[in-house]
DNA sequence: TCGTTTCCGTTGCAAATACAACCGACTTAT
DNA sequence: ATAAGTCGGTTGTATTTGCAACGGAAACGA
């Protein structure tokens, strides 16, 4: 476990905590290390989860098979990322996704109750971890709400306007760059790339926006 | 403030905490009560928020005006509900929504840092509140991810199948009731009601599902 | 410099969608 | 009992979308 402390130090969860403190905390938090061969499952649909997980080596897929057996890949987990934190509430029921190691991987499990039940003065940085965890989930929450705001629009044009409008606001100016190319933006908004490209050009011709590459301006 | 303690007792945040303890905690958490007349703003776009809010009287709308001035109502807040918890992370920037009182309303503000920085033994139930808050956000997170899963499907049929499939799984059987009528389900999935109704019937005719009112069965 | 790849705009077409309108079955209020 | 309202299914049409395919511009590497 110790060899992963440098990895943990760079994670959001342990941001601001030194390597020595992390080492001490691993005991206090009853962290458990598990390793998986490529192709093995880290978590399975139907299991119950009350741990928060951090990937410290390898790569994972979060995927789902529906009632009729159609598989879809929800997201990828890379080293240093935290996952499982959305499923630890007692009322959240069992997992609806599989988590699969697509490379040989190493995962550290943290007991949630241990984290949020602050212990004695023994680990001074514990409250920092509580804050990190809390802010991380809060921020994730905000991003999800924001994205739902775009996606709940019916047409491609409305989705684009919702997204671009918020980006402009976030940058505090009507001209800004976005972190996507066309295909990525289309995937993000769950629309077809060519249809979206088409719509962008129409909006430009109508004088709503201008753009060049990933740089946009609202008029 | 004291007169709202019975309301707070029934909230998710203070679940499991007695009225006396809540009273004691209000000081410890530096809770602040604000009241608003109908039509007044509780929060405005562009403000920064580092408090968690609980509505203890009245009714609020969370709404947004985009770059071109088009207003849309994101959601409604009813008495006892908590809001703002998605915006308190330091990196979350300023609010992109307005919060408007649509009735005369009362809101209690709680300082986040005060909540998650557990104080001395003075308030024994503090850690219970931390847990409640944590699980509430975690659960909200899960719901958002789940909904995004439905909404990211391209066609009405796929959205329906994704939703129904997960409901069946959640109930652990292929027959189950849903908490929506047709219009509500359409709104939830962001599709047109009549188109959805049409698609449901097609799916029934194709032998994928059967249903009656809000009771469905997957075949 | 040439070939390859990536990115993005464009087009045509089939499929899916939103929207409006209408109908019948049921429920609720008066 | 009648009227009004709600709910869900159906239909027709104009619009929007996804999809496949193509082509030009730019970036890249050999």
Image: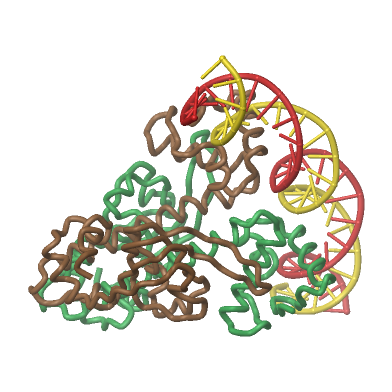
Chain colours: A brown, B green, C yellow, D red
Q: Residue at x 37, y 45 (%)?
A: B44
Front-most of D23 and D18?
D23
Total marks placed: 0
Q: Residue furthest left?
A: A121
Image quarter of residue B139: bottom left
Q: Is residue A219 visible?
A: no
Q: Which image quadrant is residue A9 in? A: bottom left
Q: Residue at x 43, y 64 (%)?
A: B141
Residue at the spot x=77%, y=63% of the render?
B199
Q: Position of residue A197 (x, y in %)?
A: 62, 34
The answer to whether residue A184 is left or right of residue A105 is right
Image: B171 above or below A26: below
Query: In the displayed structure, would residue B184 be above or below residue B71?
Result: below
What is the quadrant of the N terminus of chain A in the image?
Answer: bottom left
Give the image location of residue A193, x and y in percent: 62, 40
Viewer-proximal residue among A98 and A67? A98
Q: Is residue A76 left or right of residue A204?
A: left
Q: Position of residue B82 (x, y in %)?
A: 37, 65
Residue B9 picture location, percent across and down? 32, 78
Q: At 44% across and 81% down in the image, what residue appears?
A: A48
Q: Does the rendering let one see residue A4?
A: yes
Q: Please tell me which residue lies in front, A4 or B58.
A: A4
Tell me where residue B86 sits by quadrant: bottom left
């Amino acid at each position: 476990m110790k060899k992963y402390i440098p990895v943990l130090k760079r994670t959001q969860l342990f941001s601001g905590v030194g390597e020595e403190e992390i080492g001490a905390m691993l005991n206090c938090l009853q962290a458990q290390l598990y390793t998986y061969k490529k192709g093995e499952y880290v978590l399975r649909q139907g299991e119950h989860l009350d741990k928060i997980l951090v990937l410290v080596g390898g790569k994972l897929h979060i995927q789902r098979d529906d009632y009729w057996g159609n598989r879809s890949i929800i997201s990828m987990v890379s080293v240093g990322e935290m996952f499982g934190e959305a499923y630890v509430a007692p009322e959240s029921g069992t997992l609806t996704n599989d988590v699969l190691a697509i490379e040989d991987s190493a995962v550290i499990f943290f007991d949630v109750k241990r984290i949020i039940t602050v212990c004695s003065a023994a680990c001074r940085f514990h409250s920092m971890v509580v804050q990190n965890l809390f802010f991380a989930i809060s921020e994730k929450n905000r991003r999800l709400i924001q994205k739902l705001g775009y996606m709940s629009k019916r047409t491609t044009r409305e989705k684009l306007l919702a997204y671009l409008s918020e980006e402009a606001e976030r940058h505090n100016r009507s001209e800004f760059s976005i972190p996507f190319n066309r295909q990525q933006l289309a995937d993000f908004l769950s629309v077809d790339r060519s249809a979206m490209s088409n719509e962008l050009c129409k909006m430009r011709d109508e004088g709503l926006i201008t753009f060049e590459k990933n740089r946009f301006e609202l008029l």
